[in-house]
Image (cartoon, helix red, strand yellow):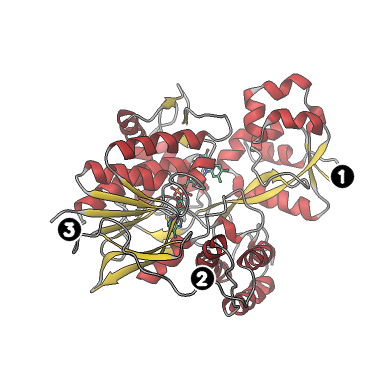
Amino acid sequence: MKKRVLVIGSGGAGLVAAIAARRRGADVQVVSKASRGLGTCTAHAGGIFTLACGGLSPEEHYRKTLETGHHQNDERLVKVLSEDAEKTLRELVRWGVTIEFERGGASVLSTAPSMVMGGAGFTAELIDIAEGSGVEFVDWTSVTEITVKSGRVVGAKVQDWRTGEEGFLRAGSVILATGGGGQIFSNTDNPGRITGDGYALALGAGAALRDMEFVQFYPLGWAEPGFPRWIVDLSLVDFVRVTDCRGLEFLKKTLYEWGYRNGAEGGLFARDRSARLVAERDREGGVYAHLEDLEENSFDDPAVRYCLGLDASRFKDFARPLRVAPLEHYFCGGVVIDSRGRTAVDGLFACGEVTGGVDGASRVGGNALSSVAVFGLRTGEAAAEEAGGYNGTGSGPVPGFLHEVSQSVGQSPLALRKELQRETWKALGPIRRTSEMESYLGFLSDLKVRKIRIDTPVDRLLALEMRGLFETAKAVAEAALKRKESLGNHWRSD
Ligand SMILES: Cc1cc2nc3c(=O)[nH]c(=O)nc-3n(C[C@H](O)[C@H](O)[C@H](O)COP(=O)(O)OP(=O)(O)OC[C@H]3O[C@@H](n4cnc5c(N)ncnc54)[C@H](O)[C@@H]3O)c2cc1C
């Protein structure tokens, strides 16, 4: 019988896994909520992969990853990451992905359409390769359940949110590659579709989560009214003054005291404590990036452009102190996997940001994309090998119609999401307190029973996403309350 693998998510992890499974002879379908590759964190990424090559040995990469993760990591996964990353990226080059290996350095940069969104070049090339190898894509479709029968995954329920049409996709193996859950927070650089659905789907299927309290906040992001939510590279401190409301250059000074040679290095290994420091100063009256320090021609410098994170030419009109603050960037925790992406549920696999274990309590910058590649490849291969036969001929969604799409009562799902995001930021942001987290759990119980009004197809999508947001928020709050001490990305002021 033919093997069929269903991949949920078309970011880097899903695409690498899909191609790897296809190369192992499986029929592969990739389902995603938007058009393939779009609305993914991978496409938004800077495109930096940290790995042992050039100057960094696998042992050093392993050591740095455990140290940065405060030894909360799954050491077996870290070993695989540090030993396999270069080999895996060279395999991706053989597939046709364009990757520049920096000589004598620890990172590679995928050739990209822009300096800011390096990841978009990565996903675009992977999509071409996947399409060319016969991977089938099901776009604009949400997975609403992973179906398990007699202890084994048999496929997933899906819904085309534009029409409300429901279906079932059969598969011998299902791979969760749904990314993180950044949208539970009001201040995040994650795109709108990153709503933690994978955590809810995994829990529903019987898989376990770990380390959910360790949400990575990037130390600097634009907090100026009217500016988009976007990260500012920590190397900013190497170009301009970043000060608190008293004018003190606290961040650069502290990074040096911690032993880092510059902001860029701190951005790789000290995101957790830098974010906490910036959050504290932000509460005391604000943190400011002094763009007035830049010469006119600095805006053409690629390093400055990368660091500002937005079209640098726009900043020429903003040569003044601009407000910056931490924002949510990445989920270190997630689904428990083994080194081939297997979960506790037979036939259910996971790879990419939806998983936990590689990062422990805090992530090394650039390790996310390396994990996406390394575990995407291993997971895709394992899922194909272990898919067995699938029972049926289903080559696409089975038609059927959902319940009434328009309800006249209830709250708009967008308003509900915004309320959740504001409350989550207050309770589970970079600085946490027991009392706030406890009352937040009460807020979540109230939220769960609210009615949602659906007037448009987009409302339907947002309503479907409420489940992922809710389950993810609950998992983070419960894990955060359970961990009494401050560690890595989890900082309790009490
Ligand atoms: C601004 C920014 C810059 C970054 N820069 C870097 C960097 O330079 N280096 C680095 O290592 N890391 C970086 N990261 C982190 C890294 O990009 C992500 O961790 C990684 O790309 C996640 O990949 P993924 O494939 O796991 O998930 P994603 O790329 O986020 O893809 C998730 C996919 O799942 C789909 N999906 C989710 N739920 C469902 C559902 N219910 N049904 C169907 N489909 C679903 C989505 O539609 C999407 O296709 C950055 C992150 C951001 C936000």
Q: Secondary structure at mark 2?
A: loop
Instruction: Find residue 66 and name its label.
Output: none
Q: How would you rate the neighbour count of disc 1 (Cα within 10 Å): few for under 14, some for 14-19, many for 20 or more?
A: few
The answer as to whether callout 2 falls within 8 Å of ligand 1 is: no
Front label number (2 vs 3): 2
Residue plotted at (45% across, 51% down): 353
The answer, for residue 239, to whether it is visible in the render is no
Residue plotted at (23% across, 59% down): 172
Which residue in the protein does label 2 denote?
405
Q: Give the residue type that dot 3 points to.
A: Gly
Quarter-of-image position of residue 414: bottom right
Residue plotted at (78% across, 32% down): 291
Which residue in the protein does label 1 denote?
246
Asked if the residue under mark 3 is in contact with the one under mark 2, i.e. CB atoms within 8 Å, the reply is no
Asked if the residue under mark 1 is in contact with the one under mark 3, i.e. CB atoms within 8 Å, the reply is no
Tell me residue 157's x, y (percent): 36, 66
Is residue 26 depicted above or below 114 in this figure?
Answer: below
Which residue in the protein does label 3 denote?
388
Quarter-of-image position of residue 439: bottom right
- Which of 312 and 257 lies nearest the eye of the viewer? 312
Q: Secondary structure at mark 3?
A: loop
The answer as to whether callout 1 falls within 8 Å of ligand 1 is: no
Tell me residue 228's x, y (percent): 69, 45
Front label number (2 vs 1): 2
Quarter-of-image position of residue 214: bottom right
Q: Give the residue type that dot 1 points to.
A: Arg
Viewed as shown, does residue 124 lie left or right of 259? Answer: left
Viewed as shown, does residue 442 lie left or right of 16? Answer: right
Front label number (3 vs 1): 3
For this orientation, the residue located farthest to the left is 1
